[in-house]
Image (spheres, grey):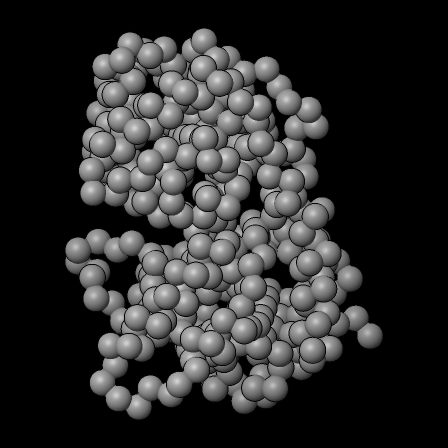
Amino acid sequence: MTPRILLLSAYDAASHQRWRNQLVAMCPDYHWQTLTLPPRFFQWRIRGNPVSWLAEPCLSQPWDLIVATSMVDLATLRGLHPQLATTPCLLYMHENQFAFPVSEQQQGRLEPQMVNLYSALAADAVAFNSAWNRDSFLRGVDALLNKMPDAVPPGVVQALTEKSRVLPVPIENRLFVDQGRALNWRCPHLLWNHRWEYDKGPDRLLAFLQALEGRSMPFHLSVVGEGFRRYPEAFDQIHQQFAGHIKHWGYVESRDGYDRLLREADIVLSTALHDFQGLAVLEAMASGCVALVPDRLAYREYVPEPCRYRSDESSPEAEARAAADCLEQIMVDKPASTSPDAWRASRLAGRYRALLDDLIAGR
């Protein structure tokens, strides 16, 4: 009998769609059924997804395994559908609400964190896309429980640790260049390819570019990524102040066009304050770019130390100077690009299949 797997994505953003499509493609020997909800109305989605799916017929069917993303309220879902209580469940953590940066208006939100905690407790296994994601989640749970006044059972964090593992979102094989390519060290093409939101550090990007300009360093610039109706003002200032350096600006509609840009750029740049795995950087590295990233987050897991500039979250200006220093040294040393081979889909497919099989078998 072909194992039947129910895949739940309660906030089906682009990166979540990509992951679940890859998962189904990597594991074609299973029967997959997918339930998704659009990536909007965050508070309602993370708390209300079991209600939104309350009358879904497939939740009354027998399944060999449930795979749910981190936005799914897995504990409530299993409570509302008791027939699922004995079905093994894998929770996949693209992100965790303990480490997610929030605006001042959102400070102190407890419910999203509790959804993550309850879901992890209800799952049979929890997979994280990076060690940094896993460790920040476990630290966050520990800190939260230590604040509670009473009736906190011992061993919660230890139990979560034992069921947790790191299993990255794969990078498609087609993105990897088989051989190193020539890079323009005289006037490098810098690629900043992230969501146009405050947590990706656009103010730090502006400060970095101003530092390069102050040193008369030559560069070309592409600033791409998913944009929104409202975005940080730093982008408009960058577009105006550095117009003479810009090769590409804004969202690249075509995937083929974006892939070409990855192969055209020399250095992939991050100024992020938050990145749970760093797919944009990994994709560019696979395509032959040298990385230039802050020494924090998941970047330490795959970017060589000489390509990580000193992190200073308290001072964008000081961090910009450190990034400019690092770029100057990189241009002198001319390092070869580092291919993130361990993140290849063909390398990770076996690990995914082994985990699914183990859970289905009850191991």
**Residue 96 seen by the camera:** no
> Which quadrant would the C terminus be assigned to in this image?
bottom right
Vertical placement of residue 231 versus 9, above or below: above
Residue 164: tell me if it is visible. yes
Residue 80, image x, y percentages: 47, 86
Residue most toward the right? 1
Give above or below for 208 relative to 151: above
Number of numbered discs overlaid on the protein picture: 0
Left or right, 293 with reference to 265: left
Q: Quadrant of residue 180?
A: top right
Q: Is residue 269 left or right of residue 341?
A: left
Q: Looking at the rendering, which quadrant does residue 87 occupy? A: bottom right
Q: Is residue 132 above or below residue 61?
A: above
> In front: 179, or 295?
295
State the image coordinates of residue 271 (x, y, percent, origin top left).
34, 36
Q: Front-most of 274 and 231?
A: 274
